[in-house]
Image: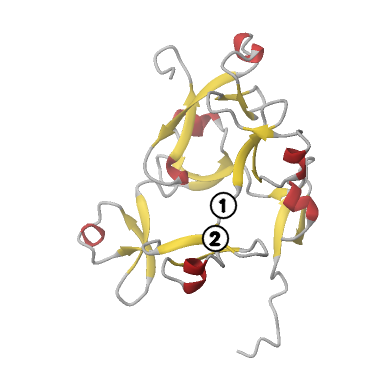
């Protein structure tokens, strides 16, 4: 193809503002880079119920936190065969276990270029080996604001530099309020003591972010 015609959404993404309004902006839009605008799927997860029905809900949905609803790809892996065909199989599939099928991530690494674009390349890609491309998470940290709201930012983020956001303390805990908003707070936070916030504990159901969930802390499972 000549490239004379270009996909109209190239370099664009769908976002939402603090009021829930959705719009499409450039990936370089300052409002997106600053965190003022966030991806429309932010805070969402695709799940399945006991009957196999799949749909999208908030990550803080009580049914997801309780385990009633599970991540839709739980227990599966994206693979490729010898012909390069891609599909998803159960992690216990004999073809995956014996190596006939390989994970699509095998030998790959997620990287970022000097313009901030992220993509996946082979681990032996000359640009990665030379340092021209760096791991996508390089220079990023988890930070919180004064209320405990969590952000993934670069260390040169203006809000971090002026002290509006601080790096996430390691001894803090996840918590949720009655509106299902998630926070990261000190174990001694007054809102935990008054039950304004309820502590959550992290549950690992497998490898990968999609297999990490949270449930309400109780006297029996407190960390």
Q: Position of residue 122 (x, y in %)?
A: 43, 68
Location of the C terminus by quadrant is top left
Q: How is the image coloured?
A: secondary structure
- The residue lying at 64 percent from left, 9 percent from top is 194
**Relative to 96, does residue 127 appear above or below in the rendering?**
below
Q: Is residue 66 left or right of residue 194?
A: left
SS for callout 2: strand
- The residue lying at 33 percent from left, 58 percent from top is 89
**Relative to 47, does residue 112 appear above or below in the rendering?**
below
Nearer to me, 57 or 14: 14
Q: Are marks 1 and 2 in contact (CB under 8 Å)?
A: yes
Question: Label 2: which residue?
Answer: 134
- The residue lying at 56 percent from left, 33 percent from top is 61
Location of the N terminus by quadrant is bottom right
Answer yes or no: is residue 67 visible: no
Quarter holding residue 188: top right
Q: Which mark is residue 138?
A: 1
- The residue lying at 25 percent from left, 56 percent from top is 93
The residue at the far bottom in this view is 2
Nearer to me, 126 or 81: 126
């Amino acid at each position: 193809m000549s490239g004379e015609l270009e996909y109209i959404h190239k370099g664009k993404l769908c976002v939402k503002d603090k009021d829930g309004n959705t719009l499409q902006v450039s990936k370089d839009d300052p409002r997106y880079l600053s965190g003022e605008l966030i991806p429309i799927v932010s805070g969402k997860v695709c799940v399945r119920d006991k009957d196999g029905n799949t749909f999208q809900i908030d990550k803080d949905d009580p049914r997801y936190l309780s385990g009633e609803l599970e991540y839709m790809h739980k227990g599966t892996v994206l693979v490729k065969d010898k012909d390069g065909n891609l599909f998803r199989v159960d992690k216990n599939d004999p073809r995956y276990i014996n190596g006939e099928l390989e994970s699509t991530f095998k030998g790959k690494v997620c990287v970022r270029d000097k313009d901030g674009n992220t993509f996946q390349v082979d681990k032996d890609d000359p640009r990665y080996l030379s340092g021209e491309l760096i791991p996508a998470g390089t220079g990023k940290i988890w930070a919180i604001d004064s209320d405990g709201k969590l952000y993934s930012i670069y260390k040169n983020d203006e809000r971090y530099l002026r002290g509006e956001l601080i790096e996430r303390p390691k001894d803090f805990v996840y918590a949720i309020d009655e509106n299902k908003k998630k926070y990261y707070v000190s174990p001694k936070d007054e809102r935990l003591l008054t039950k304004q916030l309820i502590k959550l504990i992290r549950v690992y159901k497998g490898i990968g972010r999609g297999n990490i969930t949270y449930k309400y802390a109780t006297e029996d499972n407190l960390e």
